[in-house]
Image (cartoon, rainbow, N blue to C red):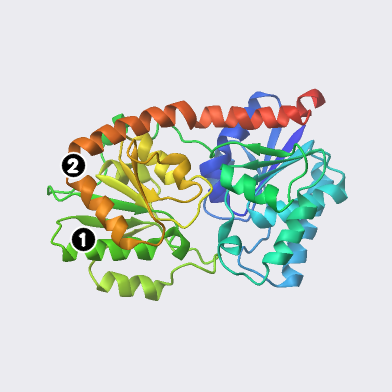
Amino acid sequence: MKVLLVCNTGWNLYNFRRPIARILKEQGYEPVLVSPRDEYVSRLIAEGFRWIELPMNRRSMNPFKEFVVFWKLLQIYRDEKPVAVHHFTIKCVLYGSIAARLSGVRRVINGITGLGHVFLGKSAILPWVTLAYRFALGGKNTRVIFQNVDDLGHFEKLGLTGSGTAVLIKSSGVDLQRFSPASASSGGPQRGSDIPTVLFAGRLLREKGIYDFIDAAESLKARGVKVRFEVAGECDPGNPSTLSEDEIRAIMDRGIVRFLGRVDQIEENIAASDLVVLPSYREGVPRILLEASAMEKAIVATDVPGCRDVVKDGKNGLLVPVRNPRALADAIERLLENPELRREMGQEGRKRVIREFDDRAVAQQTWNVYQDLGIERQI
């Protein structure tokens, strides 16, 4: 019996979906991973998962190319005949849900991991996306998994989910062994000075608050605060709000922050940092904040959906108003000046992640959704 996990990148499947794929294997199912080809596909295959290529370009708006993606999904579903499909990211949710209906797949799980730039701005396609969601997310044998209460409530207010189909599972969880205080002593970048380091890690998108981070860094350096600012992440050509290479070079020329590019072993950079910051405009549940908390680092984030699901203001970190670089700079300076407060917040953060965000527990919650749809009875 097959269950298809469908996403717009192999990177996403590798970093976030392996725990549920492993549970499916343990329960006697064959998880089949579907995504465009990237460098993470070989890692999935090396771990023993079967993978099918999906010719998708996340940025494409070409109707013909988008129909080709939909048609390929329809062919995959008809050929594989899965007992259930689980979609992640907007195009996979929309195209995959329709393909599932037409191909006779009886059980559909859709993961809404964040609302994305379409909902954040005044996108011209928002009415069409809303209409498509209303059609795709209906049906009694559909479940829609949200990562935070705000997104769930927004979709319910718009009437995009059917009665009893919405489920709240906070985040995709975090690996508590990989991200632990013990791993902080296992190596990683060596600083060679006692200047504190503040880390931003994520895709270089405007709505991630990257410019607010840079402005806060510039403000603190103007105040004479001795601090190192680092950015771990790369451009995302599939997203229209990504920074360009020219913009990054212009920022680097100002000498305010250091860009590290893509980092595969982000735990090493977290370990070498004194504070982790994410001034995002909206999130599902941000993984970097969970990872930093798991490693007993204090965190600073904006008071927006997703971020406030992780940060309890004054407990494991600080929340600041969105799009407010000055408030962000003040919060960073406050924590840099108080190592004992950072230590206490870090310890509280680790405890909270253990209680609520262990990736094994999160995967089990997802398996419970599968059981609710009745796939266990198919073995």
Q: Which residue is mark 2?
A: 338
Where in the figure is residue 71, as x and y percent of width and height? 80, 59
- Badge 1 crowding class, 10 Å Cα cut-off, few under 14, some 14 to 19, many 20 or more, is many
Circle count: 2
On screen, residue 221 versus residue 172, left or right, reads left
Of residue 105 and residue 78, the one placed in the foreground of this image is 105
Query: Going from the N terminus, do you reach mark 1 or mark 2 first?
Result: 1
Rendered residue at 60%/27% (across/down): 364
Looking at the rendering, in which quadrant would you find the C terminus?
Answer: top right
- Residue 44, position as x, y percentages in the image: 57, 42
In this view of the protein, which residue sits in the foreground, 212 or 34?
Answer: 212
Q: Are marks 1 and 2 in contact (CB under 8 Å)?
A: no
Q: How far across and how far down the image is residue 151, in percent?
A: 60, 48
Instruction: Locate residue 87 relative to residue 225 in the image: left or right.
Output: right
- Residue located at (18% from left, 42% from top): 338
Residue type, mark 1 in image: Leu
Which residue carries the number 1 mark?
220
Classify residue 322 by image quadrant.
bottom left
